[in-house]
Every structure is written in structure tokens, then in C-alpha cells.
Image (cartoon, helix red, strand yellow):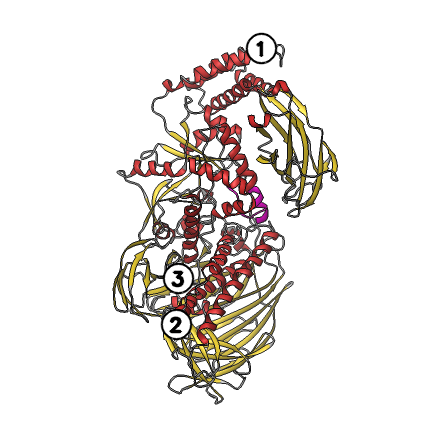
């Protein structure tokens, strides 16, 4: 019958017609006073009712405004009819429709000086609360932004009006519309569909469409609504056993992406105002936003909105869980950065709102490091949520609720949101609350046998905006509809508490390994300048914190620069956002990030210089000399380039503590000469002084020719293209390269991914490879006694690559210091080393440990990992020999069979048309070694490359109080590193953080320079947990494989 009468189609048509009568009366707002600015230059006080706008232009509705990144204020007075003062009134605006552009305008509406809500394509209507209707007029101001995502040349302000809402018509429309959509998703043979459609039809037949807009018309709608509502309230009897969907309002606001950070600060004001305004209308509405950084900006920019948000957090309506400072990338930041993300995030939430967040919420991040479970668990996190793994290209992840086992064995309770996205196979964190998504989230969920309650995050996101009235009304209507899961509003932390409790006695699946996203593999490499700046900054702050502690201890001062370092850390953490550091943002964002990273580096270097100065002016020296600092936790030798000065001339070398003169080598660095020296036996986390000498050491031990280099370790031969044809390891009498292969081959690939240019590398890139083999010049650059180098220059179309290939007197490292002027587009640059190694797995450095991945493509899971992330090194080893490839700022790798490859440059054209064009500087190093990476000491070799020794000049100082050498700490086991030394945040203790990196289990003793007064073990965010075992100057503890240990020590 229903098909015969086209009942579904009839109902949809009736509802479309009915929607036009929700407004039972409107009054146009014809004109505004108007002024336009460049974004960020607008008058910040134009929202106030008594603001003088008499010199502004008169703007008529229908006229145009804007352009690229423009701000405008629109101000006017609206009269309230007396007969409407007891009605539900709304303001309705179309401030800047799409009009052929790539985006719509976004605005913040003020009424009588109060920020009311955001106005955008999803929020065109703003309810006027009763307090605004007490007088005859209201003063409105609209702060509008034209946008940056391909806006039209001018935007048309299309609509402005005051409207009187018929509440019954509005309620009926949303309820009937939701039921009609439910009918669409149920099977035609489902009796519940038949009953629901019959009920809908009965209610529609009660509406008198003879004279739309008449009193009789609206009375009939009221009767239809009361009938339909009463019947819907009885639907619970039709379904007793149903899953539950917990709906939570959410607005994912990318800190920067297709807009700049300054724009996101404004997006927060608009989005949060809208949320607050909806909360006044819907008491059951619950909302989450996760970023402390954005709350901090809101407090600075819009304190009135911030205070209202704070009230809603206190009342329990607004949730702030998320666990981190921002939602960062987790592939590229180092382990300490990930800890600080949680520490800074949780600390802000506790101090501002009195809330301890327990869930890490990372819905849109491009893969998740295997180190994360331990980092989260030891930072007070109970649960982890994402949706992004559903974007994988090849394989469906087998679980949606599971325990994720980390690198050390720590398990983190994990849940994936499975909300379907219309027209796509992946799931979304920007969900809709409609029958298709509520039914679809349950249909897609894989762990139905252990859990029947799912979390649905709904609202417009990425660019903010958040939930709409339509979504909330739909959620209300779906509380208990036949054929659908039940729907309720609640927050994420209570949801996860219920979920953990529900499955605690059940067998959950376990995923033991990284959460690798089979997509967006280009984010390991895009915007190489940002990757380099991040790596350098992380180690600069490592040095700055340790030196500041050392300075305070040695000089008996308390000058630790907490505020300065935290200012730098906050900026560093911000720029690790998952579209900034991965390189997937527009050009302006990348320019901002480069400036931020420069500021971060300047702050860190200033702290280092102040700490060094404090130490150096107190070191006793009989004559001029230098002091060499080692910020790593093991004694080491290292190379230092000292600028030529009045103290350190080109004829200067250094003498150690027993009178041995160490070799020195004059080198040309940029435009000024330097002296290269090798300092030996520099203490762990300490310093060592060296006297200066004018005597020279003549030893060389190098043979350097244009096609050949030899030192004590290797014989290296080059062909006419500058590629290595033979790398013979003299120590083990074996050829490192595969038979007939060439090493250090620079390879380019046409890189045109299917979907997301800056994000993706698709497998077919390998089908089209060209070598960089047009050698323009080669020359002998250095010939010892410390280092021997060849300088190669290649030309590739519009680009130039200059490389200094260096070997050393006392190091097995072969360095490839590279300067690139890159002008190619959509061209991937890699370097390849086919080595004489047979292994089915390679080992990659990651945060606080390492991970093994297959070198074969046996399965689709192996195949999908054709590009993977690694930090400072990757190693390929067989039983008694191996080869490691180190780097100082790269992350993309691929190891297939016996070929080690490092990805150097990506050069996408979207969303930044200039990405990676310009000058690059980086170093990668090859280290052949005995045994595997452990026996080859590769972890320390990689640290040595990334964290060089520091030096300072010393003038003779007979009155100094500090000794010639100092060591902060000494570790008795080679498998443990002291990664972080800093002042504790809240007391006078020194915080020390260790990690085990060789997959060993043992007891470790750490001897400090000073006696220990007190020591406690704490979690990663400095919360004390238990007493530590110590005696005199020695701290003792046990470590498990890849375990992180953190202590607070009072000296």
C-alpha cells in the first residue's frame, strides 16, 4: 500500500513544505553600518553597544564585502515588536554564502555587547533569550571573516532578518524528519518500519495544508505534533533489547591547516559561543573539546566567553578530556615531547578547571607510535580513542575495542569510534546524529560480543563550528525509536568508565605493536624544514634543561629558568600539531611555524648560553683553554668545530689532562674558518677542560682522491657519477654493498598521489624512478688529520645537490652532509644503499626504544608498510654483521629485502604550492658494524650524530671554584640511558628520566656527583608514586625491556 501511494515520497515533500512555515513571521533587517579591515587589524571593541560607528559606510543587504582573509564589522539596531515579546524569536543571517568559492564566511554575533554565538553555513540562526526581549530594541554587531580557503572575490551578505518561530511546527518537523530518515534505513520487510511509516502518515494527514500560515494550519500542526510525540514515547515497548549509542557534541578544531593559527583562535570564539548558546536551549546537551592550548587562547582573547565555558565545565555539561596540550602528531615528536604534551595538557586542565583528564583523544592523527601505551599509562591516562586507523588503504583493523600492548608490555584500553561517513569507507569524528549514522555505528562495530554501548562524537569539525540545533533535535527524537539503537547524551570519561567496567571480566583482544596508518605516509617527510627544526629544538631543550640543573648545582644558585623554558616548550608543543609538523598545511601556516621554531630555538640557546656562562666563569684554569660539555649519559669522544678567535687561532690545538696533544684540523665553514678538534673521554652529563697548545700533530692516516677515500676503517670507491661502487670494511674484510650494486644512489620519483598531495605517498611512485647522476664536479675537500672529505655536486633539472662525504680518524661513521637547492615539484628524493645483508626484518629507532618491521611483502599488512617512520636510525643485520643508516632530521624510511632507503624530500604542491622548494641541509651517516645494532653501539652512534658536544672558551682563572672535569651521573649498565635531566615543576628536586633501550632486564645503579638526600619514583608527569632505593650517592632500580623510569631526587 505504501509503495502504491508513494507514502515516503509524499511525507518528504510535505516536510519540505512544512519547514518553510517554522517561521510564522519575519522582519527584514535591511541595512548595517559597516567597516572592513585586513584580518587581525579590525577594531576589537566594535561589539560594544555605544561604539561610535557614524563614520562607517552604510551597507545594504545584498551588497558584497570581503575578499581573501578580510575582517568586517556589521552593526545595526533591531526593533522588537510588542506582540512578539513572549514568542520564541531568532535572528537569521546568511553573512557570506559559498557563492562559487571554496568556503563560506564565519562570524561571531554580539547582542547588546554580549557574544551570543557563531554564525556560519551550519549555524544560520541564533535564538534570542528572554532577557534581550525586555526592551523595544536590541543592538547587534557581527564580526565577520571572509576566509582563506579559495573565497570568492567578494562575499554577498544575502540575508538578515528577525523571525518569530512556531514552536510546535519546529518540534514536529524535527521529530517527523528523524522518523522519515529512520524509515529509510530499515529493511522494507521490518514490521517496525511499517508501523513507523503508518504512524508518520497518520500524523501528516492531521495537518491542514488548505491555508498554510493560517491559525487553523498552525493549530493542526500542534495537534499532529502532540499525537506523534505521544506515540513515539510508547516506542520503547517495541524494542526491549537494544544497543545504546552515547552521543557527545564535538567540534574538532585544527589548530592550523587550511587556515592559520590566528584564524583558529577566532574559530574557537565562534564555536564555543555557539555551544554555550545551544546549552541554554537544550539542558541534556553535552559537549567535548580537548585542547588546553585553545582554552588558553580563549582566556587571552575572549575572557567573557572563557568564564562561561568554565561555568559549564563546573556544572558537568562541558567536557575537557583529551590528555594532551594539543592533538599532536605521534610519529615525528620524540618521546620527551609526547610526555610534555600530556604533562602540560593535564597541568593546565587541573589548574584552570580542577579536572584531571584520563582519556587521550586523538581522532585525526596519522598513525600511533608503539611507545604510546607506556607513555599514556605512566602519565595517568586510562583510555585511548581514535578513528583514524579506519582510513587505512589496504586492511581493515580487526578490533574496535581492545587492549593495545606497547613496546614494554604496558596495555592501554583502546576504543575506536565507528561512526560511518556518508559516501566513504572510513569512520568519522565529525559525525552526524541521524538514523543512518546511529544504525551504522552499531552495524560496523566488531566487538558486539563484549559491548553494546558505543560513543558517537557529532558536530561539524576540522574548521570548527560544532553541533547544530538540528543534530540535537535529532538525538532527542532518537532516544528510543524502533529499529535503531537507543540514543542518550553523555560525556566521554563516563562512557569509558562504563565501557571498562563492562568488559573487565571478559576476554578482550590484544594488539601488540604500533597502530600503523596505511595512509598519509608522506607526512613523515613533507615540509622538511619543520621536521629539521623540530628535531633540533627537542635536543636543544634537552641540553638547556640539563645545563640549567648543572649550573645551579655547581654554582649553588637557584636560577633554573622554569618560565622561560616552559614558554619555549609550549610553542614547541603547539607546532607539533597533527597538521603543522606533518607538513600538511597551507603555505602561510608553514611560514608561521618556521618563525615559531626559530623563536623556540632562540629561547633554548639563550638558556644554554646563560647556563654555560655561569659555569665557565667559575672554572679554575691556569691558562686559556676550552671546556667541552657532554649532555649524554655516557662518556664519549666527539668532534667539535671551534670558531677561530683571539684565543683559539688556526694554529691552536688542545692538550688533555695528562699532557697529550690532540690533533686539530683547520676547516672552512661557511665564510669563516674553524678548527676541528676531537675531544676524548668527556664525562657523562658533564664537562671536561682542555688546555690550548700551539704544537701540532702531523698524523693523517687518510687517502683522499676524487674517486677514492681510505681510512683505518674503509676503502671507498666512486664511479664517474659520484656513486659508491665499493665500500670495503677493512675491520671485517668484507664488502658492505651487494654484489654489482652502487651505494649512496640519489633517486627521484614522480610523486602524484591519488588524493592528498602533501599527505600521501602511493605505492605506484616506485614505477617511475630517475637517478641523480649528472655529476657537475668533485673535489678533494679535506685530508685530515681528523677528517677526510670529498665534495660532490650534482645537477638535477632546476635543482643542485652538494654533498660532503666524510670519514674520520677514530670513528666508523661515514657522514654524508648534504646541501640541496631543491626546485622540483611533486618529486620525491630518496637515497639508497643496497647492502650485502640477508635479513627478513629491519630495526627502526622510535621513541624510547625501537621496532622491528619485515623487509618482505608476504602479506597485505607487510605490503602496506612500504613507507614507515623511524627516528635517528634504521638497521639491517644478519648474525655477525650489520649496516645502520643514521640521520639528523629525517623520518621516512623503506627497507625492502636488502636495500636501505631514506626519504629526503617530498615537494608536494597542495595545500602549499611551494612546499620543500628552497635550500635544505641534512646529514645522514652509514655505520657498518659487527653483530646487530646492539653490538654495533648504534643507539649511541645516532645520539652522537644528533647531539654533538658543546664547547666554550675559557680564559685563565686562578680563582675559580670549579674543577677541571665534572660528571653529573654515571650509569653502570650499558643498556640504560638517562634521557632527561630537569628541575621538577613543583619543588626543589631534580627530575631524572631513564629508559632501557636494548630489550634487557636487569638492575641498574646510577652514581651521582652529589650525595642523595631523598629520592622518590614518580610517574612521567612528576606525580610521586613510591620511595626509591638509594644509598649515599647511588640510586638503584630495576628495569624491564624498554621500560621508562622517572625519579625525583633531592641533593
Q: Is residue 1024 visible?
A: yes
Rendering coords of residue 548 (x, y %): 43, 66
Rendering quarter of residue 240: top left
In reply to whether residue 1007 is colored magenta, the answer given is: no
The answer to whether residue 125 is left or right of residue 490 is right
Query: Is residue 299 shown above or below 17?
Result: below
Q: Locate the C terminus by quadrant.
A: bottom left
Label 1 element class? loop
> Which residue ends up furthest to the bottom in the rendered image?
695
Among the two numbered marks 3 and 1 on one chain, the one whose residue lies closer to the N terminus: 1
**How many neighbours does mark 1 have within 10 angstroms: few (below 14), some (14-19), or many (20 or more)?**
some
Residue 411 picture location, percent across and down: 32, 48
The answer for how far apart the CA atoms under marks 1 and 2 are is 89 Å
Q: Which residue is mark 1?
A: 208
Name the residue carrying label 2.
554
SS of the residue under disc 3? strand
Q: Nearer the viewer, residue 157 or 371?
A: 157
Between discs 3 and 2, the one toward the N terminus: 2
Give the label, 1 or 2, closer to the camera: 2
First along the sequence among labels 1 and 2: 1
The residue singled out by tag 3 in the image is 983
Nearer-the-camera pick, 853 or 270: 270
What's the mark number on residue 7?
A: none
Q: CA distance from mark 3 to mark 1?
A: 75 Å
- Give the quarter of the image for residue 126: top right
Distance of label 3 from label 2 (alpha carbons): 14 Å
Q: Is residue 483 above or below residue 711?
A: above
Foreground label between 3 and 1: 3
Magenta span covers which residues?
251-267
- Residue 730 % position (x, y): 40, 78
Amino acid at each position: 500500500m505504501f509503495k502504491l501511494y508513494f507514502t515516503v515520497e509524499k511525507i518528504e515533500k510535505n516536510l519540505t513544505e512544512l519547514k518553510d512555515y517554522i517561521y510564522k513571521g519575519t522582519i527584514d533587517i535591511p541595512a548595517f553600518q559597516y567597516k572592513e579591515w585586513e584580518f587581525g587589524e579590525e577594531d576589537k571593541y566594535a561589539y560594544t553597544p555605544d561604539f561610535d560607528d557614524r563614520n562607517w559606510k552604510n551597507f545594504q543587504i545584498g551588497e558584497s564585502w570581503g575578499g581573501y582573509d578580510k575582517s568586517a564589522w556589521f552593526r545595526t539596531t533591531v526593533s522588537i515588536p510588542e506582540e512578539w515579546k513572549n514568542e520564541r524569536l531568532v535572528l537569521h543571517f546568511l553573512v557570506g554564502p559559498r557563492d562559487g568559492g571554496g568556503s563560506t564566511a564565519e562570524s561571531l554575533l554580539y547582542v547588546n555587547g554580549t557574544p551570543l554565538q557563531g554564525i556560519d553555513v551550519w549555524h544560520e540562526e541564533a535564538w534570542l533569550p528572554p532577557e534581550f526581549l525586555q526592551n523595544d530594541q536590541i543592538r547587534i554587531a557581527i564580526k565577520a571573516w571572509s576566509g582563506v580557503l579559495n573565497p570568492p572575490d567578494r562575499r554577498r551578505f544575502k540575508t538578515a532578518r528577525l523571525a518569530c518561530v512556531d514552536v510546535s511546527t519546529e518540534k514536529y518537523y524535527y521529530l517527523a524528519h528523524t522518523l522519515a530518515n529512520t524509515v529509510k534505513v530499515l529493511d522494507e520487510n521490518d514490521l517496525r518500519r511499517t508501523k513507523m511509516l503508518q504512524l508518520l502518515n497518520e500524523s501528516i494527514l492531521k495537518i491542514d495544508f488548505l491555508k498554510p500560515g493560517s491559525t487553523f494550519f498552525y493549530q493542526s500542526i500542534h495537534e499532529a505534533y502532540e499525537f506523534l510525540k505521544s506515540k513515539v514515547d510508547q516506542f520503547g515497548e517495541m524494542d526491549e533489547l537494544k544497543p545504546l549509542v552515547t552521543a557527545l557534541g564535538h567540534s574538532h578544531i585544527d589548530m592550523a591547516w587550511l587556515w592559520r593559527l590566528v584564524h583558529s583562535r577566532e574559530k574557537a570564539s565562534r564555536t564555543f559561543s555557539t555551544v554555550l548558546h545551544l546549552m541554554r536551549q537544550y539542558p541534556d546537551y553535552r559537549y567535548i573539546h580537548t585542547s588546553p592550548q585553545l582554552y588558553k587562547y580563549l582566556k587571552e582573547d575572549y575572557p567573557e566567553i572563557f568564564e562561561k565555558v568554565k561555568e559549564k565545565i563546573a556544572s558537568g555539561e562541558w567536557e575537557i578530556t583529551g590528555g594532551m596540550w594539543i592533538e599532536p602528531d605521534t610519529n615525528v615528536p620524540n618521546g620527551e615531547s609526547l610526555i610534555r604534551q600530556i604533562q602540560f595538557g593535564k597541568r593546565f586542565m587541573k589548574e584552570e578547571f580542577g579536572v584531571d583528564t584520563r582519556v587521550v583523544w586523538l581522532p585525526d592523527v596519522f598513525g600511533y607510535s608503539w611507545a604510546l601505551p607506556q607513555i599514556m599509562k605512566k602519565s595517568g591516562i586510562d583510555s585511548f580513542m581514535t578513528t583514524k586507523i579506519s582510513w587505512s588503504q589496504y586492511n581493515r583493523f580487526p578490533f574496535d575495542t581492545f587492549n593495545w600492548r606497547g613496546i614494554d608490555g604496558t596495555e592501554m584500553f583502546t576504543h575506536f569510534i565507528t561512526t560511518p561517513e556518508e559516501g566513504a569507507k572510513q569512520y568519522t569524528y565529525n559525525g552526524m546524529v541521524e538514523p543512518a549514522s546511529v544504525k551504522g555505528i552499531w552495524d560496523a562495530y566488531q566487538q558486539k560480543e563484549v559491548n553494546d554501548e558505543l560513543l558517537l562524537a557529532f558536530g561539524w569539525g576540522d574548521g570548527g563550528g560544532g553541533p547544530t540545533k538540528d543534530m540535537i533535535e535529532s538525538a532527542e527524537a532518537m532516544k528510543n525509536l524502533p529499529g535503531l539503537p537507543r540514543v542518550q547524551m553523555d560525556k566521554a570519561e563516563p562512557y569509558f568508565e562504563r565501557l571498562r567496567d563492562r568488559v573487565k571480566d571478559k576476554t578482550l583482544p590484544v594488539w601488540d605493536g604500533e597502530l600503523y596508518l596505511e595512509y598519509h605516509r608522506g607526512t613523515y617527510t613533507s615540509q622538511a624544514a619543520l621536521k629539521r627544526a623540530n628535531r633540533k629544538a627537542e635536543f636543544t631543550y634537552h641540553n638547556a634543561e640539563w645545563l640549567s640543573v648543572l649550573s645551579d648545582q655547581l654554582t649553588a644558585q637557584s636560577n633554573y629558568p622554569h618560565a622561560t623554558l616552559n614558554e619555549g616548550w609550549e610553542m614547541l608543543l603547539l607546532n607539533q600539531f597533527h597538521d603543522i609538523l606533518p607538513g600538511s598545511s597551507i603555505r602561510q601556516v608553514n611560514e608561521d611555524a618556521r618563525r615559531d621554531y626559530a623563536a623556540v630555538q632562540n629561547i633554548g640557546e639563550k638558556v644554554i648560553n646563560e647556563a654555560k656562562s655561569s659555569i665557565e666563569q667559575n672554572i679554575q684554569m691556569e691558562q686559556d683553554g676550552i671546556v667541552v660539555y657532554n649532555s649524554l649519559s655516557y662518556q664519549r669522544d666527539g668532534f667539535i668545530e671551534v670558531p677561530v678567535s683571539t684565543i683559539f687561532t688556526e694554529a691552536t690545538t688542545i692538550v688533555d689532562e695528562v699532557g697529550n696533544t690532540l690533533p686539530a684540523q683547520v676547516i672552512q665553514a661557511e665564510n669563516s674558518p674553524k678548527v676541528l678538534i676531537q675531544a676524548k673521554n668527556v664525562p657523562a652529563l658533564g664537562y671536561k677542560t682542555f688546555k690550548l697548545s700551539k704544537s701540532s700533530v702531523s698524523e693523517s692516516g687518510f687517502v683522499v682522491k676524487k674517486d677514492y677515500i681510505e681510512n683505518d676503517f674503509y676503502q671507498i670507491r666512486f664511479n664517474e657519477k659520484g656513486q659508491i661502487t665499493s665500500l670495503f670494511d677493512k675491520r671485517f674484510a668484507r664488502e658492505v654493498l651487494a654484489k654489482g650494486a652502487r651505494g649512496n644512489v640519489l633517486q627521484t620519483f614522480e610523486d602524484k598521489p591519488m588524493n592528498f598531495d602533501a599527505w600521501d605517498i602511493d605505492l605506484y611512485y616506485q614505477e617511475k624512478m630517475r637517478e641523480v647522476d649528472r655529476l657537475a664536479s668533485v673535489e678533494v675537500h679535506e685530508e685530515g688529520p681528523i677528517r677526510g672529505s670529498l665534495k660532490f655536486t650534482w645537477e638535477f633539472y632546476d635543482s643542485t645537490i652538494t654533498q660532503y662525504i666524510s670519514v674520520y680518524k677514530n670513528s666508523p661513521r661515514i657522514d654524508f652532509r648534504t646541501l640541496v637547492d631543491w626546485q622540483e615539484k611533486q618529486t620525491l628524493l630518496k637515497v639508497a644503499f643496497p647492502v650485502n645483508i640477508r635479513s627478513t626484518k629491519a630495526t627502526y629507532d622510535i621513541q624510547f626504544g625501537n621496532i622491528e618491521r619485515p623487509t618482505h611483502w608476504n602479506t597485505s599488512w607487510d605490503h602496506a608498510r612500504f613507507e614507515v617512520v623511524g627516528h635517528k636510525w634504521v638497521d639491517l643485520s644478519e648474525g655477525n654483521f650489520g649496516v645502520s643508516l643514521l640521520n639528523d632530521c629525517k623520518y621516512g624510511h623503506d627497507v625492502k629485502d636488502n636495500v636501505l632507503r631514506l626519504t629526503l624530500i617530498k615537494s608536494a604542491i597542495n595545500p602549499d604550492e611551494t612546499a620543500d622548494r628552497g635550500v635544505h641541509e641534512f646529514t645522514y651517516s652509514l655505520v657498518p658494524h659487527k653483530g646487530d645494532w646492539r653490538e654495533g653501539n648504534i643507539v649511541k652512534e645516532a645520539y652522537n650524530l644528533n647531539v654533538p658536544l658543546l664547547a666554550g672558551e675559557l680564559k685563565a682563572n686562578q680563582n675559580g671554584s670549579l674543577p677541571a672535569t665534572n660528571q653529573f651521573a654515571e650509569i653502570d649498565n650499558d643498556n640504560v640511558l638517562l634521557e632527561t635531566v630537569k628541575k621538577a615543576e613543583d619543588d626543589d628536586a631534580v627530575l631524572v628520566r631513564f629508559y632501557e633501550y636494548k630489550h634487557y632486564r636487569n638492575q641498574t645503579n646510577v652514581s651521582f656527583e652529589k650525595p642523595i638526600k631523598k629520592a622518590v619514583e614518580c610517574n612521567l608527569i612528576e606525580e610521586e608514586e613510591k620511595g626509591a632505593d638509594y644509598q649515599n650517592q647511588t640510586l638503584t632500580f630495576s628495569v624491564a625491556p624498554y621500560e621508562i623510569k622517572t625519579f625525583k631526587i633531592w641533593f
